[in-house]
């Protein structure tokens, strides 16, 4: 699904990511455990195509994202569900409206977006929050809404960063169960956390853990980081071709789908 090859990033002259290579295949669940200054959030941001690396290559469903024009990247992001540590929810809108917004960007009709939005909220155990304004929710409830927005659809790839921060144990279990369920539905899942206990719970649900420290993956042979994974041409991805429509023009720019659909 996505492959990062020799990816590196710097900030203010300091190395944040140092030649990281890893891949996430279809229906695979990867857990990145890393604390402060590990580069975890930067790595997840690159995987979610929210930023580009300073060096290295990013492949998504057979396309070299690193070569695309910046104006093309929003069309790629339509295929990736992303939940950041800050949630970035619309505080004056309902939980359902926040989830529906992500689906509307992908081209779903209001009716379909509402149905899929309610399904996503139910999957994370927050169906009762649908009509409540986000501004009135607790931090844990906001985490659930943010996760529901990321998995709604569901998209081919889900990337979540610190999904359970400040959440109680019941909410954490809902998050773990929802990520496991979305992986079982066929989505690739990449989840980052600084909490060893949460990482272990995700591993118990079938996740494969990678430890990140000071911008490098540690404790795993390189052969384990890309298990039987090579970039596939878009045309060879079978059913994914119907979901992910990356149409490329003569300048190698990703264009909007010719027909709007669940992308």
Image (tube, rainbow, N blue to C red):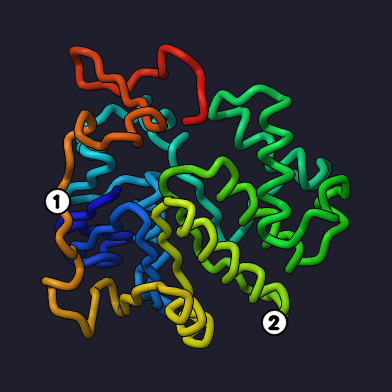
Vertical order, 152 against 32 (above or below): above
Residue 247, position as x, y percentages in the image: 30, 20
Name which residue lies at 73% across and 54% down.
Answer: 122
Residue 189, relative to residue 90: is it above or below?
Answer: below
* Sequence-first tag of 1 and 2: 2
Q: Note whether 216 is above or below 45 in the view shown.
A: below
**Which residue is tagged 2?**
169
Residue drawn 41% across the image and 12% down it? 258
Q: Is residue 230 left or right of residue 100?
A: left
Quadrant in the rendering for residue 250? top left
Cβ–Cβ under 8 Å for marks 1 and 2:
no
For residue 148, side relative to residue 2 (left or right): right
Q: Which residue is at the front of the view, 5 or 117?
A: 117
Q: Position of residue 192 (x, y in %)?
A: 45, 68
Residue 5 placement (x, y as % from top left)? 16, 55
Mark 2 residue crowding within 10 angstroms, few (<14) / some (14–19) / many (20+): few
Q: Along the line of sight, which residue is nearer the eye, 71 or 249?
A: 249
Find disc 1 in the rendering and name its residue: 230
């Amino acid at each position: 699904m996505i492959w990062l090859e020799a990816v590196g990033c710097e900030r203010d002259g300091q190395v944040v990511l140092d030649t990281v290579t890893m891949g996430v295949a279809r229906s695979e669940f990867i857990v990145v455990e890393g604390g402060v200054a590990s580069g975890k959030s930067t790595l997840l941001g690159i995987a979610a195509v929210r930023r580009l690396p300073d060096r290295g290559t990013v492949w998504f469903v057979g396309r070299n994202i690193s070569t695309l024009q910046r104006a093309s990247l929003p069309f790629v992001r339509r295929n990736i569900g992303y939940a950041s540590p800050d949630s970035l929810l619309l505080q004056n809108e309902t939980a359902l409206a926040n989830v529906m917004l992500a689906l509307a960007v992908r081209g779903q009709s209001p009716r379909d977006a509402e149905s899929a939005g309610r399904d996503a909220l139910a999957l994370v155990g927050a169906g009762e929050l649908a009509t409540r304004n986000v501004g009135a929710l607790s931090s844990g409830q906001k985490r659930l809404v943010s996760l529901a927005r990321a998995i709604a659809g569901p998209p081919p790839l889900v990337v979540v960063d610190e999904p359970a921060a400040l959440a109680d144990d019941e909410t954490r279990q809902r998050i773990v169960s929802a990520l496991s369920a979305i992986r079982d539905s066929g989505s690739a899942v990449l989840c980052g956390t600084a909490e060893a206990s949460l990482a272990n719970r995700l591993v118990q649900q079938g996740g494969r853990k990678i430890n990140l420290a000071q911008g490098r993956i540690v404790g795993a042979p390189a052969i384990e980081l890309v298990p039987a994974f090579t970039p596939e041409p878009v045309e060879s991805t079978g059913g994914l071709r119907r979901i992910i429509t990356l149409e490329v023009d003569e300048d190698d720019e990703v264009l909007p789908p010719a027909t709007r659909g669940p992308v």
